[in-house]
Structures are given as C-alpha cells and as structure tokens.
Image (cartoon, rainbow, N blue to C red):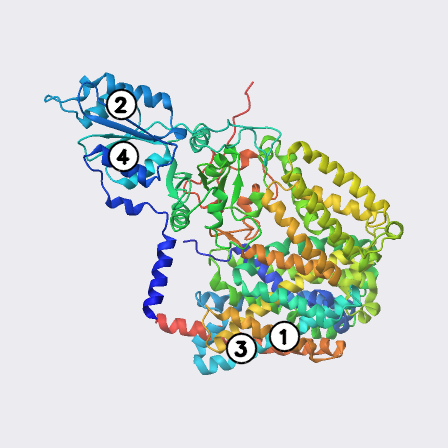
Amino acid sequence: MRVERLSKVQVMTITVGAIFGVDILMVQHHMVKIARQDGWISLAIGGLLSIGFAFIYYLLAVLHPDLDMPEIKLKLCGPFLGRLLLFPTALYAVLYAGLSARIFAQALKMFLLDRTPIYAIIALMLVVVAYSVYKGIYVIGSISDVIFPLCVFTVVSMLLLSFQQVDLDRLKPVLFENMDNVIRGIFPGFRHFMGFGIIAYIYCHTYQAKGTYKWFIAGLLIPIAFYVLLTVVSIGVFSVGSLEGLIFPTLTLSKSIEFPATFLERLESFTAVIWIALVFESLIVFFYISIRDFSVLFGISRKYDRYTIIVLIIAAYIISLLEPHGIQVLNYFRILVSTYTLYSLIIVPLLTGYALLKRRRSKQ
Amino acid sequence: MLSLLKKLASSKKDRIYEGRTEHLKQFRLSANIGDNTTRLLDIMNNSFDIKTRTFKIGRTNTRAAVIYISELVNDFIINNNIIKSLILESTFVTDKNGKVDLDLIKDSMLSLAEVKEAETFDEIVLGIMSGDTFLCIQGFAKGLLISARQYKGRTVGQPNLEPSVKGPQEAFVEMLSVNLGLIRRRIRDPNLTFEIHKLGRRTKADVVLMYIKGIAHKDLIDKIREKLLAIDIDRVTTAVEVSKLMIDKPNSIFPLVQVTERPDRVVAAMNEGRVAMIIEGAPDGIIIPVTLPILMQSPDDYFESWLAASVIRITRYVCFFISILFPAIYISTTSFHPGMLPTRLVLSITASRTGVPFPAVLEALLMEFTLEILQEAGIRLPRVVGQTVSIVGGLVIGQAAVQAGVVSPIMVIVISITALSSFAIPDYSLSMASRIIRIPFILLAVTFGSFGIAMGLLFLLAYFSSLKSFGLSYLTPVAPFRPRDSRDALIRGPLWSMHRRPEFLRPEDTQRQAPTGRSKPNES
C-alpha cells in the first residue's frame, strides 16, 4: 500500500503558510509604529533570532519522530501536567484563527466588499476552511503546494511593480538615535514568525529524510525576506508618518499600483485573491493545530479527530464576532500573539531540554 | 414473522443471483447425444439463431452434432473444417476396433487452432454464447468446444472524441480481438499482459486488463483486479461503466479514470506504468490511474517541439480556468469591482447593457442554459442536421437575442469565449465537469464578488487535493509537488530529458531511456 507522507517541499510550503496570514497585511504598520524607519531592522533581527528558536522546535520534533506536539507534551509531562500545558496552545490556536478571520474580513470589507456583512464573509471563509481541514494534513500539504508559488509570484511582482514609487530617502536616517526603539521592536518582530512552530505538528507526518531541516529553514527564510522587503518598500512608498495611519498597508500598496495603458487599471481585486489564499492557508494550519490539541486534550483518537472541526469552527465563528470594534480586535490579536510567544519561549526550550536529558539518561 | 422475513431475504437473494450459469456446473454431459442437444437447446430457450446439425461420422454409425450461434461463427470453417472432415475423412478417427476416438478427432482431424474439451453445461453454454461451436458425439460424456468465431463489426476508423493533427489516426472498434491486435501491433514485448475476466451475470462480457509486466506496479494491478472481481452486476456494456463501479468516489463529477478510444494513448500509458482496460463490444478503453495534469495532455503534444507543445498546453490550462471562471469574473467585475477596469471599458459595457431587462447574473444563466441546449441538440441530432442547429443556435438565436434586447452583446462574447475554451479541454468528461461547476462560480460571484470566486477556487483546490484515482492524488505531480515528474505536467519537457518514467506511478522499471536518450550528432 502507498504510505502517504508529507514531502520536504511540503514542509517548506506549510511553514510559509503558517507564518503568513493576516500578518502579511499589516506587519509594516506594526513595525513602523515601534521602530519607525528602522522597523525593517528590528524585523530582520527578530527573523534571524526565530531561526534559532525554530531549531529548538525542530529538535523536539526529531526526538519524537512518531509524535506531534500535543502527544509530545503528554509523553514528557504526563497526562495531567501535559494537558495543563496543552490547554493554552489549544486555546491560542482557536482564538488566533477566529481573530484572524475577523481581521481579514474587516480588510476585505474595507477594500473589496463594502456592502457585504462581515458575518457573511467570515461564515463563507470558515465553511471552506472546515472542509479543507476535515480532509486532513495531506490535503493541507497539497493546498500549500499550489498556493505557495502563487504567493511568491504575487509578492515578488508587487514588490517589483511598486519599486518605482520607492523613495529610499524615507528610510533615512538609519539607526540614528533610534537604537532603543530598534531593540524594543525585536520581540514584536520575532513574534511575526511564530508560525514556525508548525514543524512540531507535521514532522511526524513527513518522510523524515535528510534535508528536511534545510527545507524547513527555507520555509522560514522566505517570510523573513518578504516581510523585511515589504516593510522597506512600504516605508519607501508611504513614509513613516503615513504608514502609521494605514492599518493594512499591503492592501494599500497593491491598490496603489496602476496600469494606465493596459486592460486592467488596478490590480487589487486580483491580488486580493492571493491574500485570501494566504490567509486561508494560515487558517487551515491553525485549525489543524487546534484540532490536534483539542483531540489530545480530550483523548479523541486520530481516527476521529477531524470531527472536532465542527465544534472548533463554530467556536471560532463566535470568537470572530464577539468584539464589535475592529480596532479593538487588532489589539486583542497583538496581545494574544505576544502572550503566546512568551509562553512558547519558556515552555518549548524547557521541554526540549528535558527531552534531551531523558534521552541521555536512557542511553546511559 | 421470522420465517416470512427469511423467505423474503431468500427470495431477494434468488433474484440477485438470477442470470448466473454457475448452477449448471453440476450438470454434466450424458453419453446420449439426443439428451445433450435437447438439454442445451432448452437452457438457451430454443432461440432461433442457435443452429444444430446432426450427422453421422463417416461410414460409422456414430452420430454427432454441432451446435452454434449462426451470427457469431464463420460458416465456412464449420462446413469445411468440422462437418466435411468428420463426414468424409472418418478413417482417421476410428481406433483399431473401428470405434470413434474423441482424442483422435481433436488431435488429428480438426485443423483449427483452438479446440478444448468440455464436460459441464456451464462451460458449454458460455462457450456457445461467446461464439464457439460445440461438437457432441454419441457415446461420449464430453464434447469439444471449437473456436470458429467471426464477429461482424465495423473496420478500424478515426477517433471521434480525441482527434489529433499528427500521429496515428486509428481508434478502437467494438470488436475486442481487433482492439487487442491494435495494441499488440504497437508493443512487441512478451511482458505485455492481457488478463481476461468475465463480467456481468447476463452479459458475461470479456473484460481485458492490459499492462506491461515489469513496468506497472504489482500493487496497482492487484488493486484493480480486486476491484474488478468484486463487481457483481447483471450487465456491463462499456469499460466506462465498469470504471464507475470501481472508483472510490463515484459521486465525483471529475473523471477519475481516463477514457480513450486511441490505442496509441493506451500504449503510451502502459509504457508509463499505468493499467488499461477494454471490454468486448465497446469502442473505448479506460486507463487507470489518472491525474488532472494527465487529462490535460493531448497526443499532439508529443509530435511537436517541446516549446510549442508547452505553450499549447499552458493555453489549455488557461482555457480550463476560463471555461470555469470567465462568466463569474465578468459578473464580479461589473457588479462589485468596476473600478479595476479602465473607465472607457466600463462605459462601453454599461452602454451595451442599456435596455437589457435582466441583471447580469440572469443574463449569464440564460445564455448558459441556451448553450447547453445547443450542445445537447448538436450531439443528439444527425450530423447533417447538427450543422444547421449550430447555425440556427449560434447566429440566429445569438444575434436575435441581442437585437431584441434580451441579452447584451458583451454577454454573448463572454459566453462564446467560455464555450470555446471548454472545447479546448482535451478530455470530454473534464470539459463537461467544467461546464457544471461554472454555475456555482457564477452564484458565488454574484453573492460575494471576487472573494466568492477565491473561496470557490480554494474549495475546488481542497476537493482536487482530496480526490484520488486508485490511490494516486489527483493533482500529482503539481501537488504534492514532484519536481522530477513535472517535466510532463504543466509543460511538456524535451523528450530526451524524460529518461525516467513518472515516479508517482511507482513503475517497477523506472528507466525509460538511456540518460543521454538521443542519437549523437554527426561527427564530421
């Protein structure tokens, strides 16, 4: 029988999909608010630091090649403590998915569908997400294989097309009396790449062949490069002052590209399709994470875990509509990601260290 | 109550197995020729086309009979090679005591290639029904099934559904033997295997599984054979029908097997490691497994330069998307996002829609419905009248509808381009599927604009990713992405670069040609 496994390429594409998401629409705005014209430097440093932490996650996964993250937690910490550690992650994934859906629906309403109610946009998106997640991790892998090249093509095209509008003087002065802000921006920059944690969920489904790590790191480097370039280009096009006032600068950037002599005058409707695909991919990854976390939390076997999606989708839908004010949703989102990043930075290295110690002991 | 239920269950079981001939296995021939012929004719309901000829073998007093179906045999062979031989050349068939010897008849008298002994009624009835002639001799509790088949049918013609500009122009016909010959002629490899199975309780059609041993993976062959043998149905007439009973997702509108009428396509598929199946009486075969990129390939791709073929193939993919999305994109752009179009184009579209009483979506659905009627009418009517339908439909209705103000000219253009694009899809079943899913996309576009289209596409992507054709992902080698196999997916790479068979088919012999793969340039 054919044994289905994720390929090395899929490790990269899923990692890219997990890192991108609604962040790609607003990362520049967020970084510029903290570190002003040097926001891209904070982002780059945060990105490089994330490579180190990604290695810790990868190591934890490699030490348990047949288990995914929730199972590893249970194995290392026992059923009670393991579940206690698992609960925040499970909660985070479903909250993240719900808030992401809401933020993206807001962006769509603002740029594309001004007359369509937010609840309808979210409902359609979540139905398609539920269908995809229900089909399992290998279908998610195939979806990311198709979305990845489209995303790379769109982002690169957008960067190239908007480059003529870039005024590099807007990036100056570099690091001038701004060191404190740059340092302050490293952690927020780092947390934009927290999606790399997906490796601990998918490694057990891969062929675990040589070179998997390289592809995983490539999946991390691509978003780092894109985010840094997007920030540089956005600062160059809009300037720091304007960028602080734009909630979704990426969408504004794609709207600003004009083709006066061609069939289409503006591209934002088409590029919006790609952003939809990117956010969709991020949502299916996070729903997959929450399925696994909740299933292990409640002792549901792998065979039936996909059915938990029904409950999770309803939960995410309710979460997405709880807060009436859009700006407040963005704040919640930031607080959520920051809190979870802190939690992971403490828990995952501890787990990895404990796993290494356990391994050494068992060898002795 | 219980007994009634049991009775009902047993009667249902009887009904299900009605039409089988296995129960005849218990009945053996008797030594009496009269009993045997009467019984055989009774089993076959004394149909008028079943012929019996009773005669005496030479100068002996031993009686013999031949039973056959007149429309399935070659009369000349029966008269000359069986009856004439037995009546006039009896000296060869008697032993020392002057008694008729069945073995001598079989070995020394019947100058025919295929003769086999038969003792039970099930094999005799099946043989006669398949076109064999049964020879029964007085005093023997066994007879001879002699193959003198001659099926009448059309000659090999050109493919109707898969025409090509260059390359072979032969298509399968309804006769299995001819079709097998078309394949054998192209592969002179002793590993080419034809596995015959009988299918259908009543039709008992000959179904042939074809593969090249040593290339096709054993698991794939076993899986197909297992699914084929599990079919229990009273009637099958085409391989496509059989495939519908074998696929994992019978409700899918997308084809999960490749239907073909081209022997060259079957040969190419078997050379890659796939398995084909043809059936007696049907002019099309199926190839298993299949993926979406395979369905977008055309035989012409391999007769042109790789660059030209790649451009054409990419055009086909674009056509596939146009055929699904174009009306939806038009509706979403004009209804939700007119700002993305140049102002003059928007004005032109608005002007052309002036006076049209329906919204764009209704206009599109109306035109779609008209197009479907035209296509159906074009298929059902005789070819001569079919052309008239296309003129009446395309020109008269289209122009009249625009002039009457029922639809706008731009909508006629949109639907025409969509229809033309669907015709550019090489696989008819895939083309039909694209016609069906166009409607949900129109509805999504009118409700959610480009967001709806995007969600529809993502749903379709998830659906495609979950589809499997005999265990093979439908989007392979694009997703999961297999760089090495992608040389013949979205593009058609140079033939010399495709020296390995597609890995996703897991061929047992992976090497197709030497790594250099081409003759060396002349040294001068």
Residue A180 in view in this figure: yes
Q: Is residue B195 above or below residue B327?
A: above
Q: Nearer the viewer, mark 1 or mark 4?
A: 4
Q: Which residue is mark 3?
A: A347
Q: Is residue B51 above or below residue A320?
A: above
Q: Is residue A290 found left or right of A267 in the rendered image? A: left
What is the distance, in whole Å, between disc 1 and disc 3 at their CAs?
25 Å
Same-chain status of marks 2 and 1:
no
Q: Amino acid at mark 4?
A: Thr
Which of the image's four quarters has the C terminus of chain B?
Answer: top right
What is the distance, in whole Å, between disc 4 and disc 2 at their CAs?
21 Å
Tag shown at residue A316? 1
Point out residue A20 in the picture as x, y percentages from the top left corner.
Answer: 65, 64
Q: Which residue is mark 2?
A: B110
In front of the other: A111 or B62:
B62
Q: Is residue B312 found left or right of B146 in the rendered image? A: right
Q: Amino acid at mark 2?
A: Leu
Q: Helix or strand or loop: what does disc 4 sit on? A: helix
In front of the other: A115 or A328:
A115
Report the residue at 65% width, 78% height from top: A319
Q: Helix or strand or loop: what does disc 1 sit on? A: helix
Near mark 2 (Cα within 10 A), the count class, few <14, some 14-19 or many ≥20, is some
Q: Are marks 3 and 2 in contact (CB under 8 Å)?
A: no
Tag shown at residue B37? 4
Q: Earlier in the sequence, mark 1 or mark 3?
A: 1
Report the residue at 84% width, 68% height from top: A242
Q: Earlier in the sequence, mark 4 or mark 2?
A: 4
Instruction: Please give the chain letter of the residue carrying mark 2.
Output: B
Q: Helix or strand or loop: what does disc 2 sit on? A: loop
Q: Nearer the viewer, mark 3 or mark 2?
A: 2
